Image: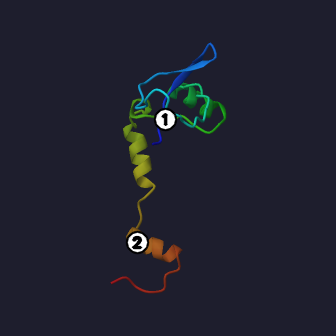
Amino acid sequence: MVLSVKAIYQDGQLRLLEPVDLHNGDTVDLTIVKAEETVSAGVIIERLRGAGLLMDIPTAADVQELTPEERLRIGQLFVADRPSESIIDEERDVSWTRP
């Protein structure tokens, strides 16, 4: 039987925090692993951000509505006199013709 149980070391003895299916006098092998400090998600996020491994990504609440002028300007960036796939083929130097 293999069992993992939390215990507290107090006054020279280990006190189990949950019941186990053992009888008085049973011999067991014991491996002690000191429990690490529990760290909250907020602390982890701040540590990652502090190390430069996490960046803030804007949410929908952070985004501002575009003005009509800005929408028009952006729309004009993609205007062409032929289909986009032709432009892409040309830039990729594709020598065959699409059906």
**Crowding at label 1, few (<14), some or many (≥20) Cα neighbours within 10 Å?**
few
Say whether disc 2 or disc 1 marks the residue closer to the N-terminus.
Answer: 1
Q: Amino acid at mark 2?
A: Glu
Residue closest to the far left: 99
Which residue is found at the position 40% from the left and 85% from the top? 97
Q: Quadrant of residue 34?
A: top right
Residue closest to the far front: 25
Which residue is found at the position 62% from the left and 13% from the top? 11
Q: Amino acid at mark 1?
A: Ser
Residue closest to the far top: 11
Between 75 and 91, the one nearer to me in the picture: 91
In this view, 25 is above or below 57? above
* Left or right of 22 in this view: 49: right
In this view, 8 is above or below 79? above
Which residue is found at the position 59% from the left and 19% from the top? 13
Q: Quadrant of residue 66?
A: top left
**Crowding at label 2, few (<14), some or many (≥20) Cα neighbours within 10 Å?**
few
Residue closest to the far right: 51
Residue 1: % across, % down: 45, 42
Between 89 and 58, the one nearer to me in the picture: 58
Q: Which residue is mark 1?
A: 4
Residue 32: % across, % down: 61, 32
Between 1 and 7, the one nearer to me in the picture: 1
Q: Which residue is mark 2?
A: 85
